[in-house]
Amino acid sequence: MPGTHRSARPRRAGRARTRTRRILLWTAGTLALLVLVAAGAGAWLYYRLNGNITAAEVDDKLGEDRPEDLSPGAKTILVAGSDTREDTDGSYGHTEGMRSDTLMVVHVAENREWATVLSLPRDSWVEIPACQLDDGSSTEPHFGKINESFALGGMHGDAGSAAACTIRTLEHNTGLRIDNFVSLDFLGFKDMVDALGGVEVCPEEPIDDDKAHIQLEAGCQMLDGEQALGYVRVRYSVGDGSDIGRISRQQEFMRSLAERAQDRLTSPTSMYDFLDAVTRSLTTDPELAGLQPLYDLASDLQSVPEENLTFLTVPNYPRELDVPEDTANVVWQYPHTDLLFDALAHDRFLSEDELAAAAEELLAMDPAEIRVRVLNGTDVPGRAAEVADELRAAGFQVTETDNAPAPVPTTVISHPEALAGQARALAARLPGSAVETAAAGDGEGAGGGELTLTLGPDYPGLRAPR
């Protein structure tokens, strides 16, 4: 089971989280220091580097159906690695537009006393909403890998459209309001490493990967930019071949990169070349598009005590457990993800242990205590009665079946405010269903309240607790 697997090696996981905290803090510290160096070097250099950063407007592509901003003083930032092949000789393959193999959400609390970095596996199977492209056309909503959203938005090479489609997908599936985004392009690593004269890595096993164009012996060695580019891309021929393993190697590389940059601060030429490579590789929303706002963000991260900087991966399990023929993707685990996204949306700190305990409490809830009214929001006659029988067989109390006032595009569980826990418990058995608070008075039956399950065409079917 996913929960059991996650806790199988707690000591190793603890060391990894501690190492990753230091990587981010060192990287933020290096960025802040480099910005100060640029500022002190003169107005010409500062404005030259400041002008390198690309600003991409996204607000006009995000639509009107965005989640409410429940914590305006906090910062929730999308960080994406843009895997574009533009300006390459084709040796890394040919792709249309842009891709992203690295997606993270960084949440910095309003009081700046804690922060959470949430990694999103690129193979997460999610609903991708309709996205507006830079040519005025729109994509169709569908299910797919989460990183497909970046590729769809960026199919014409527009970074703003790529980021906007990813933001829409994140907001649609998490309920989080994304405030800003930062994207680092595919060639950024290569140019940064060459500017510093190489970066040291210490692989524990030899690497020989034709796809990533990298051959390395085991042990510590200095990589040039071309080798570093292969190192951060390699996946299938190292370790267990997972995306999680690649993320770990990328984090280790960023630590080495930050240390090398700090060591080379005494070389004006190296520092200029490095800063030039960093800033030319960055695309952000207009609010972050400058050295000063990036310095402010780095300073906010630096001010967070290391013990309050939490790194999580979206709780997930293989989609193969639900769809046997799909061996390539993962799905997000409920109610864990619902609890996590809700906490971040309301700017509430939630540790991994607290998340696991809260999810266990919901999953242990007795279905016999949960009253459900089932409404058919599809065009399939008798659908509510079928689902009612399914719920009753699982122990839920079904109080009523009826047709919804109008068809609905997606399955929704609505609940009185006092029954939020019960709604999450039901949602844990119906993956992908939306959960919303009902209007005052709705769902307040004689039995002390009930949930309303409105069936959409995407009704997933009741599954056993995971």
Image: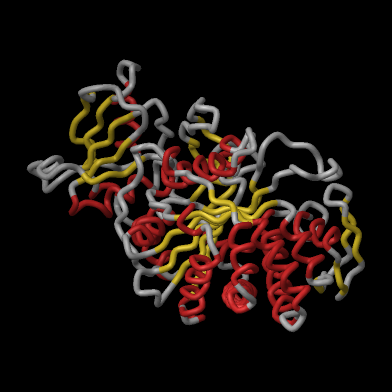
Front-most of residues 121 and 45? 45
User: Does residue 380 lie above or below 12 as drawn?
Assistant: above
- Tell me what residue is drawn at x 23 percent, y 25 percent: 404
Front residue (pair 368, 215): 215
Which residue sits furthest left? 446
Residue 182 horizontal/vertical position (percent): 55, 56
Nearest the viewer among 439 and 381 is 439
Drawn side of residue 244 relative to residue 213, left or right: left
Identified at 28% across, 36% down, the residue is: 453
Please say if 51 is above or below 87. below
Q: Percent x, y for residue 72?
A: 31, 60
Residue drawn 59% across the image and 73% down it: 35
Rendering quarter of residue 135: top right
Asked whether residue 12 is in view, the answer is: yes
Quick check: 170 left or right of 424? right
Q: In terms of depth relative to the viewer, which is nearer, 35 or 29?
A: 35
Q: In which quarter of the image is residue 20?
A: bottom right
